[in-house]
Image: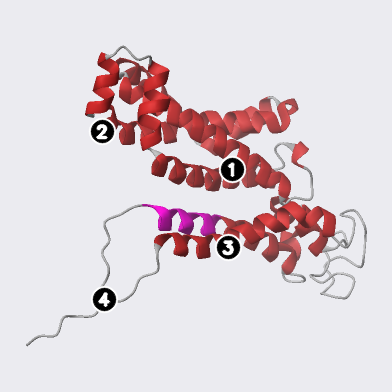
Amino acid sequence: MRTPARRTPAIAPRVRAVLLVIPALVIVGIAVVGPWIAPHRVDEGVGIPYAPASSQAPAGTDHLGQDVWSHLLTGGWGLLLLATMIALLVTFLAAVIGTIAAVRPAVGDAIERCTDLLMLVPPVLAILLVMLSWPQSGAYGLVGIAVVIGTTYSARVFAAAAAGIAVSGYVEVAVASGERLWYLVFREVLPNLRHTVTTQLGLRFVEAMYLVSTAAFLQLPATLGRTNWAVMVRENGAGILLNPWAVVLPSIAIGVLAISVNLTIDALRPDDRRMRT
């Protein structure tokens, strides 16, 4: 008689998500509390340029002889703040626009035409055009163009996810009862798109982090300052062989944050995978 195969115990999705999000939380924690625990001011020289690690500079010095570790601790909060703001705005606007497109097909056609037009513009190119044309717009201009460009992609996802819910029985009953559009959007459809909202919020954060880092790397806008992680990579690239930590540490911070958020989203995403036998 054949013995039934044993099932390999799988880690619960929520537990796996918690484990995967820990690296991102560590990076966020460093960015938030870093300015208060940095051992040196960012403009304080502690040695010769690209000096190796020492008691004064645990990660060595940068191209100006300043402490790399202090720059790392103080250079993340601005990037994270802008990326979070962009992600929240894009997710909210895309969720509303996509749901309206699903509930009102006529409106959805017009929205689809607009999104088709905006999706033709590469995000980085749009940021360059806006920031070089209106440099005085600063961080507000960066957030504005990132929201406009990012919403077009995400709205399509929400429209597809809301299409099936929009034709369900309880939504049709609400429509027949004469409920207003905003009631249908916020009370009937969006509450059933929680997983889509969570997934899109994480993805938009990662995308926003890349866009903000790219803009900071290009020093657009200049109001982001000269101590953020992307600028550290740019300014210390020439000395990577002398003190690689000046480039490697900020690159790791950005990369680990993006990978951790992506893996966490994947772990929380509902799917039909079965336990392996």
Marks 4 and 1, how far apart in space? 43 Å
Q: Comparing marks 1 and 3, which lies closer to the viewer?
A: 3
Looking at the rendered structure, the kind of residue marked 2 is Gly
**N-term-proximal mark, 2 vs 3:** 3
Examine the rendered structure and indicate whether residue 92 appears above or below residue 110.
Answer: below
Tag 2 and tag 4, C-beta contact below 8 Å: no
Examine the rendered structure and indicate whether residue 251 appears above or below residue 32.
Answer: below
Residue 153 picture location, percent across and down: 43, 35
Q: Quadrant of the C terminus?
A: bottom left
Tell me, for residue 125, which label it has, or none: none
Tell me, for residue 7, which label it has, or none: 4
> As rendered, which of 175 and 128 lies closer to the eye?
175
* Colour theme: secondary structure
Quadrant of residue 212 within the rendered picture: top right
Write the residue at 67% across / 65% down. Answer: 248
Judging by the rendered image, the residue that carries numbered circle 1 is 211
- Mark 2, Cα crowd under 10 Å, few <14 / some 14-19 / many 20+, is few
Q: Comparing marks 1 and 2, which lies closer to the viewer?
A: 2
Tell me, for residue 164, which label it has, or none: 2
Looking at the rendered structure, the kind of residue marked 4 is Arg
- Mark 3, Cα crowd under 10 Å, few <14 / some 14-19 / many 20+, is some
